[in-house]
Amino acid sequence: MTDPLIEALRRAVAAAPHDDELRVHLASQLWERGFSDEAVAEASTVLAHSPSDTRARNLLARALGGAPDTAPAFPPPDASTRLPNGIPAPPPAESGFDWSAAETEVRHIARPAFIDGEDAPAFDAHDLQRPTTTLADVGGMSEVKERLNAAFLAPLRNPELRALYGKSLRGGLLMYGPPGCGKTFLARAIAGELGASFISVGISDILDRFIGESEHNIRELFQLARRDAPTVIFLDELDAIGQRRSEARHSGMRGVVVSLLEELDGVSSQNEGVFVLAATNQPWDVDPALRRPGRLDRTVLVLPPDDDARRAIFHHHLARRPVEGIDLVELAAQTEGYSGADIAYVCEVASENALLESARTGTARLIGMDDLRHGIRTTTPSTGPWLEAARNVVRFGEDDGTFTQLRDYLKSVHRL
């Protein structure tokens, strides 16, 4: 009869062949069940690339009839063993197989079969992504790329100079600007440039209805990032997660901001290799403490896409559609001030216009410039209200130098 624990461990080892601890545990379980040849094979695999692994050596010595040179590879199970949520583990089932213990042993490889929603971790390895996008995939936006390189990427690409000048491999960057202008896409591209894992976090991932759980979620997020460093944490809508404590409507939000500050400072552990990127449409609502040195101390203004970027965005959204005679230069010229999301909507309207006409006539036709011009005429740029709000902040708000780029841009477009 097949042993469920052995089969589960074999699947876990197949998923993580370089996890020595997991493979030694499989070998130990095989030995205890009388599969000595297979136990020797697994232990030998570990020793082939980790000759000093004491547990594998001891197990191999026992299997071959020798005396182990240290304590047993695995101590006997402790009756006080607890599950990850702190609840004492239930006794094994009558079949002799403890499913709870098995799930605990392989929880860093695979999700458990069943979870209690309230006890499920807010973040785990399945939230980590590996972006392949780089800044080379971002059309136009040359000024933003230069700023990102100068403020963030250049020091990280030069380890010798970083060591010479004592630059720590950590940091934070705040991207702000109108909605729909590619801040999330840029964050993924930065993670791709660094060859780092990427985890995107929104307000719904952090906030919890129970007191203290939101702070716990923030700690879990940073612990996961440290374990898998280098990791880029992307905090979307930072103004909601890290709003000014003076304006927080209840003390729970203040606790969230304090926990975020503690993790950014690395109070409990080092943040080496953890890069925090944040994005917001309303930087003036972000708690000033989050922008102090050592935290999100560098800022980049992400403006509506420039001419080159608009051409690239139109090309991207039309490349897989049936089109003819598309003049990207004209389209870019007619959409100055449009966000990337606005341009995507223009393409949707143009496609819909061609589809409806094809349905009326019964003959399919290609999408042409007239359809796109119609889409532009019927789409109002969404950046206008944001620019008006930004103008009021720059004119009448307190300026500590954070919004210098924004002030210069508003002057250049005659809004200030």
Image (cartoon, grey):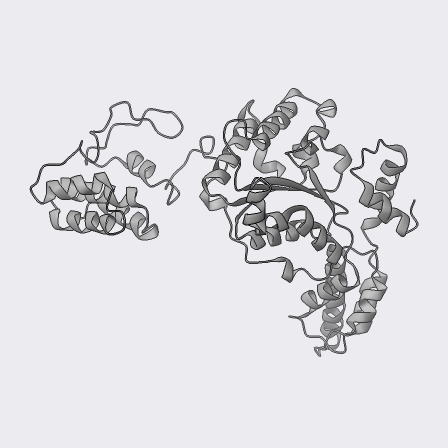
Q: Residue at the far top: name it.
A: 251
The percent coordinates of residue 317 (x first, y second) are 69, 65
Q: Residue at the far left: name it.
A: 65
Q: Which image quarter holds the C terminus?
A: top right
Q: What residue is at 24 percent from the left and 42 percent from the top?
A: 53
Q: How many marks?
A: 0
The percent coordinates of residue 144 (x first, y second) are 73, 53
Residue 226 vs residue 378: left or right?
Answer: left
Q: Nearer the viewer, residue 157 or 401?
A: 157
Residue 86 vs residue 132: left or right?
Answer: left
Q: What residue is at 19 percent from the left and 41 percent from the top?
A: 28
The percent coordinates of residue 322 (x first, y second) are 68, 74
Q: What residue is at 84 percent from the left and 59 percent from the top?
A: 336
The percent coordinates of residue 306 (x first, y second) are 79, 59
Residue 349 visible to the viewer:
no
- Is 355 rendered above or below residue 178? below
